[in-house]
Amino acid sequence: MSLRRIQTDILAVRLIPNADAALCEALHVPSSFKSLGILTTTSDDVGFTALDEATKQANVEVAYAKSFYAGASHASGPLSGEFIGIVAGPTPDEVRSGIDAAIHTIEHEAAFEALDEEGNHALFAHVISRTGSYLSKVAGIAIGQPLAYLIAPPLEAVVGLDYALKAADVQLATFYGPPSETNYGGGLVTGTESACRAAAEAFREAIISIAKSPRSY
């Protein structure tokens, strides 16, 4: 089965060069980080991955990152999508660099893959060779460790994770029990980069197998 890349759309982007102190306090950012960058996208997991990349490319930290319930198809408005992310930094230039890095990741690197022509059946099996500060914290691992970010619909996610963990010398760092806000599931697994890639491929192959024959057990 040939998988097709599903492009995540960036719906809106804004920079706040000098955010109000009350807003910064509400976001729990350091007092020296007064600039904010905000974006919304049609995919939450791609968005989380992109924000992590921002922390590697600029002096920024993730101040806020949330999925919206039920996904982009049930968004609250045309610019809402499935995800909102906010990065904070000490200067507008740093924040702009972080947002630029996030946008590059969304447009050229991280993506869901479609198992059907319509794109209704999809998976996310993305390997990060070196984590930034955001996903390292989420996974409870040291900054710079490899990570496989594995997401799929509920049943597929559970079976796929089992395949991934058995196929390679990796450890389950974070489990996203289905249903998530967007009715998916999965997890973050860590190990060497080659092990993470093997785990991601096993995850992908398991879900392809289920898609081909969903009731064969």
Image (cartoon, helix red, strand yellow):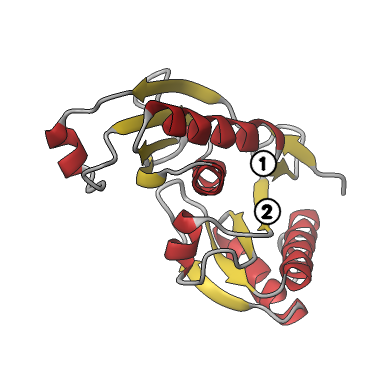
Kindly identify which residue carries mark 1: 111
**Residue linked to disc 2:** 126
Q: Cβ–Cβ below 8 Å for labels 1 and 2? A: yes
Q: Amino acid at mark 1?
A: Ala
Mark 2 crowdedness (10 Å alpha carbons): few <14, some 14-19, many ≥20 = many
Give percent across and percent down for residue 164.
70, 72
At 75% from the left and 78% from the top, the residue drawn is 168
The quarter of the picture where the C terminus appears is bottom right
> Which residue, as the protein is rendered here, is positioned at the far top?
78
Image position of 89 with respect to 168: above or below: above
**Residue 104 at x, y = what percent?**
63, 32
Residue 114 position by quadrant: top right
Kind of residue at badge 2: His
**Kind of element beneath mark 2:** strand
Using the image, determine if residue 113 lies above or below residue 100.
below
The numbered mark, 1 or 2, whose residue comes first in the sequence reads 1
